[in-house]
Structures are given as C-alpha cells and as structure tokens.
Image (cartoon, rainbow, N blue to C red):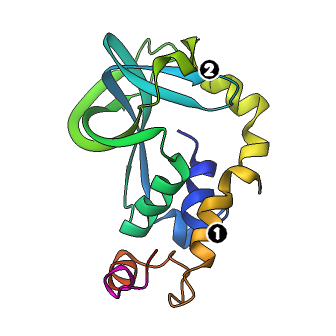
Amino acid sequence: MAPKVLHRVCYGNPNPQPWQSQLLTIKPAILHGFCRHQVQGCDYPAIIPQTNSTVRGTFVTGLTEGDIHRLDIFEGSDYTRKKVKVRVLAKVGDDSGKGSVEGDEVETETYVWTSGEDELEPGEWDFGEFVREKMAWWAGSNEEYREVDEAMQSLSADPTSGRGTGEQYHQWLNSGQSN
C-alpha cells in the first residue's frame, strides 16, 4: 500500500528515478475474505483469512522476477506468498470503503501471515496512522531493509545488483551464481 516502501525494496530508494517508477502500475484494490491486523510490537500489518472481511490494498503490475525475489526477502519467513483474487477499484471511496466501486476481478499474489494469530493485535491495522507516524522512518535507510540490501550487494556478477530487467535477473539466476 505504500509506494515508497515498495520502491525502497525494489529499487533501493523510496524516490526512484522516473523511468523506474514508470515500470510499475499501482491500482487500489479490495481483497475479500481476509482481515488485516498489526503484528504485535511492530509497525507493520499482516493479513489472515477471515470470512466476511475485506482488506483494502493495492494491485501492482510490472514487477520483475528480481523485484519479487527482493519482496520475498523483505517479507521474511512469517509470511507466505499465496495466489488470491482481488477486485481492482473502479472508484475509490473514503477510508472505510464507503463510496468505493469494485471493478474487475484479477488473480494475483499477496503475502499472508503464517506465524500464528497469537502474534497479531486484535484490532485492524491503521494505514493512515502508519503514514502519519511511521512512513518517514520506513522510507529511509533502516534495519528492516538490511537483508534485501545485503542480498543485492552480494550479486557482484550482476551489473545491476539484481535491480535490472526481469530477463537480466532471470539469466543471472539461471547462471548458478545466486544464493
């Protein structure tokens, strides 16, 4: 939901070059059958399956294999990437979803929390609060990106440090030099 965090993971910078940000298309979307909670003691959320609930988020296209690899590292072992169907919003309503109009249903993948519901706060995670109070820290250089940055720096054989095109990354992965 936070393009600055997405860009920081994918491009190493929350404010990528214009050509980089044009590679991705980010659209608001609704995921039915899931609920979003704050992870205990953390700034970030987790989604879990829950009947009759919805999660408002984003549908991102244009990600390369390298981008997805970096996102997998960033999300870590507490999450599993799973196929889901979302509804892209044709019209965005208020924060509660009132006034939103759902459009096309598309299949995509998202990161679902798999480390146990006992590690989640009972209430809904507040994205607005995150933007107001935490975004500046998350958009900067902090410990949360260490594993992604180290993985990308170790790609000495890849002249783009893993941030090249999908084809460049795919060739590098198939060369047997990846971790």
Which residue is tagged 2? 126
Disc 2 residue type (three-letter): Asp
Tell me, for residue 106, which label it has, or none: none
> Badge 1: how crowded within 10 Å, few (<14), some, or many (20+)?
few
Which residue is tagged 1? 150
CB atoms of marks 1 and 2 within 8 Å: no
> Badge 2: how crowded within 10 Å, few (<14), some, or many (20+)?
some
Looking at the picture, how far across and down is residue 85, in whole percent? Answer: 23, 34
30 shown above or below 33: below
Looking at the picture, how far across and down is residue 105, in whole percent? Answer: 21, 34
Asked if the stretch drawn in magenta spans residue 174, the answer is yes
Which residues fall within the magenta stretch? 172-177
At a point 44% along the width and 16% down the height, the residue shown is 97
Number of numbered discs overlaid on the protein picture: 2
29 shown above or below 26: above
Q: Secondary structure at mark 2?
A: loop
Horizontally, residue 107 falls left or right of residue 163, namely left
The foreground one among 131 and 167 is: 167
Disc 1 or disc 2, which is closer to the eye? 1
Q: Is residue 29 visible?
A: yes
Disc 1 residue type (three-letter): Glu
Quarter location, residue 72: bottom left
Q: Is residue 95 visible?
A: no
Horizontally, residue 76 falls left or right of residue 61, namely right
At a point 73% along the width and 39% down the height, the residue shown is 135
